[in-house]
Amino acid sequence: MTLLKGENLAKSFDYLLFENLNFEIKEGESSAVLGVSGCGKSTLLHILSSLLKPDFGEVIYNNKSLYKLKNDDLIKIRRHDFGIIFQAHYLFKGFNAFENVELGALLGGQKIDDEILKKLDIKDVIHQKVGDLSGGQQQRVSIARVLSKKPRIIFADEPTGNLDSTTANEVMEIFFDYIKENRAGLVLVTHDENLAKKCSNRFLLQDKKLNIL
Ligand SMILES: Nc1ncnc2c1ncn2[C@@H]1O[C@H](COP(=O)(O)OP(=O)(O)OP(=O)(O)O)[C@@H](O)[C@H]1O
């Protein structure tokens, strides 16, 4: 079943990034978007994940056109159904790791899943202030926060950018297990072709188009 579709999307800033761009993600699928720096990968992820209105085209989720929804309804979908992970993770620095993860769980009406904390290897630091954690630990806390809300779709922009390659691979396995177990979807923006190869679909954003690899 289709989870989300982007139809005829176009976006420009100082120059045209892409146009007539179509994208679809189905239950249980992972899609990686590759492309040179500045081609518009993060912009596309923002558009698909409800954060940025395209200049043209629609994003369809649950038979609804996201950017035609009332703001409150759009925020509900973003909070409950979408898990958005950026490299610059927006953790609450004054709170400890547990409180940050708990916030994610509460947003999705879920309880913290101890398994997620174990798999991400953050149980030992869970009561520390996130500002005191290393960059990689903070990244894993932000991933735990997103997974704890049990999103239908995970949108991740270089989610393993702060992690060494072994931890990066482990984190990717956690994503893949999650989408399999929950019939969810993963849209991943990355420069790392090895990570992209692990996804069920790979696309290259080039010449203002999304090409299937
Ligand atoms: N809010 C914005 N206002 C103006 N220009 C923007 C904005 N967001 C992105 N851009 C521009 O759009 C272009 C594409 O940016 P984007 O971050 O989507 O590229 P990217 O492919 O993800 O790059 P990278 O791989 O380096 O992260 C860049 O030239 C960037 O400066």
Image (tube, grey):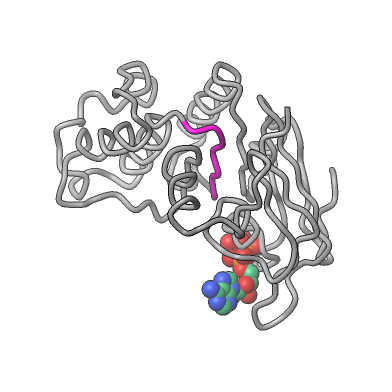
Residue 138 in the image: above or below residue 98: below
Residue 39 in the image: above or below residue 157: below
Image-based side of 118 in relation to 33, left or right: left
* Residue at the bottom extreme of this rendering: 14
Image quarter where the C terminus lies is: top right
Query: Ligand 1, what quadrant?
Result: bottom right
What residue do we see at 38% from left, 33% from top?
108
Please state the extent of the stretch shown in magenta in the rendering: 151-157
Main secondary structure found in the magenta portion: strand
Q: Count of labels shown?
A: 0
Q: Where is residue 210 in the image (x, y as percent from the top left)?
A: 81, 54
Image-based side of 110 in relation to 14, left or right: left
| Front residue of 146 and 127 | 146
Q: Position of residue 92 (x, y in %)?
A: 23, 50
Residue 128 in the image: above or below residue 150: below
Image quarter where the N terminus lies is: top right
| Front residue of 196 and 94 | 94
* Residue at the front extreme of this rendering: 70
Residue 160 within the segment the image draws in magenta: no
Quadrant of the image occupied by residue 145 = top left
Q: Where is residue 187 in the image (x, y as percent from the top left)?
A: 63, 41
What residue do we see at 25% from left, 40% from top?
100
Q: Position of residue 155 (x, y in %)?
A: 55, 44
What residue do we see at 33% from left, 20% from top?
113
| Front residue of 120 and 68 | 68
| Front residue of 34 and 184 | 184
What residue do we see at 50% from left, 24% from top?
174
